[in-house]
Image: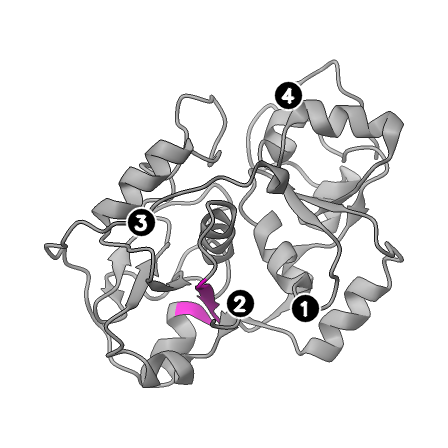
Amino acid sequence: MMNAVVSAAWLKDNLHDPDLVILDASLKVNVSGKKSDYDGIKIPGARFFDLEGEFSDNASGLPHTLPSEAAFEQASQKLGINNNSKIVVYDNMGIYTAPRVWWMYKVMGHKNVAVLDGGLPGWAQASYPTEPITAHKIAIGNFKAKLDTSQVKSVVDVKGNLDSQEFVVIDARSAGRFNGTEPEPRAGLRGGHIPNSLSVPFQDLIDDGHFKSKEELTEIFESLGVRDQPLVFSCGSGVTACVTLLGSEGILNNPKAVYDGSWTEWAQRLDLPVER
């Protein structure tokens, strides 16, 4: 089993493992307007993971929501992924979309998956090889998905939790968005946060495209005082929630899930309360 996060040096040493599959989860455009200095190149052999296309339920009316078990399985097989594949995911921002893909495979029952710390920028800055982005013919894989529904929460679950307080919601958006003092990047959404949720901005866990040290992450997460309560991670659309979730791995052993609709769903539902 790989660690949840692997270094560029580890990946370089394992590039020729026949079971290794490298997935490039970079977005062509993102709603926050973030841009990469590493467009047009990829790690050798990397396969494009279409997070906003085949790997989202585009009929949901919400961005980036988890596709069905069958759809995820079929799209993974098209990428040549097998049940014994060792998957390493990266993106061209450092740590941004890759943790979402890591979480998706964990939810779909695949345990041997990791995120590349530093992503493509860290790889390139280490002077490791890259190649132009080109499509390659890939043999169909035998990957089988088995959805663990306990790791995915719906708006019904989160609304019910307002009274039951069965779990703690952790919001990965910026402090300004959490407090409603800066605008949402998606037009028409209210500002603020889900009542009783806690703010742990994903940016606070990252330094120059890499996760901060375990000691620094431990200080951040232990300050929350969540004890052994189940945790549900949220953000704007369920992507950076997975950065904060991944950052808590090995520090908080609480049961963890993601609110898949996240703030985009909650904020446009005028029947749901908002705190500022």
Q: Is residue 101 magenta?
A: no
Mark 2 touches mark 3? (CB < 8 Å) = no
Q: Amino acid at mark 4?
A: Gln
How far, Cα to Cα, is label 4 from label 2? 34 Å
Dot 3 corresponds to which residue?
Answer: 143
Dot 1 corresponds to which residue?
Answer: 250
Q: Nearer the viewer, residue 46 or 122?
A: 46
How far, Cα to Cα, is label 1 from label 2? 9 Å
Q: Secondary structure at mark 2?
A: loop
Q: Position of residue 190 (x, y in %)?
A: 69, 26
How far, Cα to Cα, is label 3 from label 1? 27 Å
Give the mark nearer the N terminus: 4 vs 2: 2
Give the mark nearer the N terminus: 4 vs 3: 3
Magenta segment boundaries in residue numbering: 112-119
Q: Nearer the viewer, mark 3 or mark 1?
A: 3
Q: Secondary structure at mark 3?
A: loop
Q: Nearer the viewer, mark 4 or mark 3?
A: 3
- Corner quadrant of residue 10: bottom left
Extreme top residue here? Answer: 271
How far, Cα to Cα, is label 2 from label 3? 20 Å
Q: Amino acid at mark 2?
A: Ala
Q: Note whether residue 51 is visible.
A: yes
Dot 2 corresponds to which residue?
Answer: 4
